[in-house]
Image: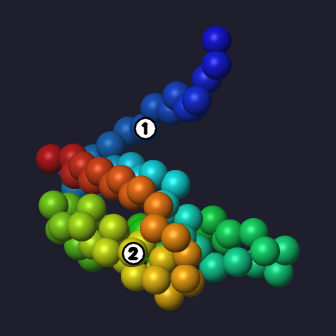
């Protein structure tokens, strides 16, 4: 059987947020000297945005940011899916 994801258990607390996003989030990254995306950087940007934004606004704001970066980089528009959940 093929495995497309890794199982992980986390202890979550009230106020914690879970953000699930498609690979379109990579457009937020900058390239390193080897031309590869700096993965830590784009996830850090998403985490920073999440910490300052109401959960219900996160998907729209992240997708807007992705579209802006696609335009700035003259990249084609990719499908973008973002789901945000806050633990109550």
Precedes in sequence: disc 1 or disc 2:
1
- Residue 19 in view in this figure: no
Separation (CA) of disc 1 from disc 2: 31 Å
Name the residue located 43 percent from the left edge and 38 percent from the top edge. 10
Could you tell me residue 85's position as x and y percent? Answer: 24, 49
Name the residue located 33 percent from the left edge and 68 percent from the top edge. 63
Q: In the rendered structure, find residue 58 and report the number of the disc placed on it.
A: none
Drawn side of residue 40 relative to residue 33, left or right: left
Drawn side of residue 46 relative to residue 15, left or right: right
Colour pattern = rainbow
- Residue 58 in view in this figure: yes
Name the residue located 46 percent from the left edge and 83 percent from the top edge. 71
Classify mark 1: residues with Cα within 10 Å, few (<14), some (14-19) or many (20+): few
Residue mark closest to the camera, 1 vs 2: 2
Name the residue located 84 percent from the left edge and 74 percent from the top edge. 34
Of 50 and 37, nearer the camera is 37
Helix, strand or loop for disc 2: helix
Q: Residue furthest top?
A: 1
Could you tell me residue 16's position as x and y percent? Answer: 29, 54
Q: Residue furthest bottom?
A: 72
Of 67 and 2, nearer the camera is 67
Could you tell me residue 75's position as x and y percent? Answer: 55, 75
Count of labels in the image: 2
**Up/down of 22 relative to 63, above or below:** above
Of 22 and 84, nearer the camera is 22
Classify mark 2: residues with Cα within 10 Å, few (<14), some (14-19) or many (20+): many
Location of mark 1 (residue): 10
Location of mark 2 (residue): 67
| Image quadrant in which the N terminus is located | top right
């Amino acid at each position: 059987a093929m495995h497309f994801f890794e199982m992980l258990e986390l202890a979550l607390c009230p106020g914690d947020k879970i953000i699930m996003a498609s690979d379109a989030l990579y457009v937020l990254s900058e390239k390193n000297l080897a031309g590869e995306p700096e993965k830590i950087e784009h996830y850090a940007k998403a985490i920073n945005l999440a910490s300052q934004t109401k959960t219900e606004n996160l998907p729209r704001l992240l997708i807007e940011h992705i579209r802006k970066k696609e335009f700035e980089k003259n990249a084609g528009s990719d499908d973008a899916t973002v789901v945000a959940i806050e633990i109550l």
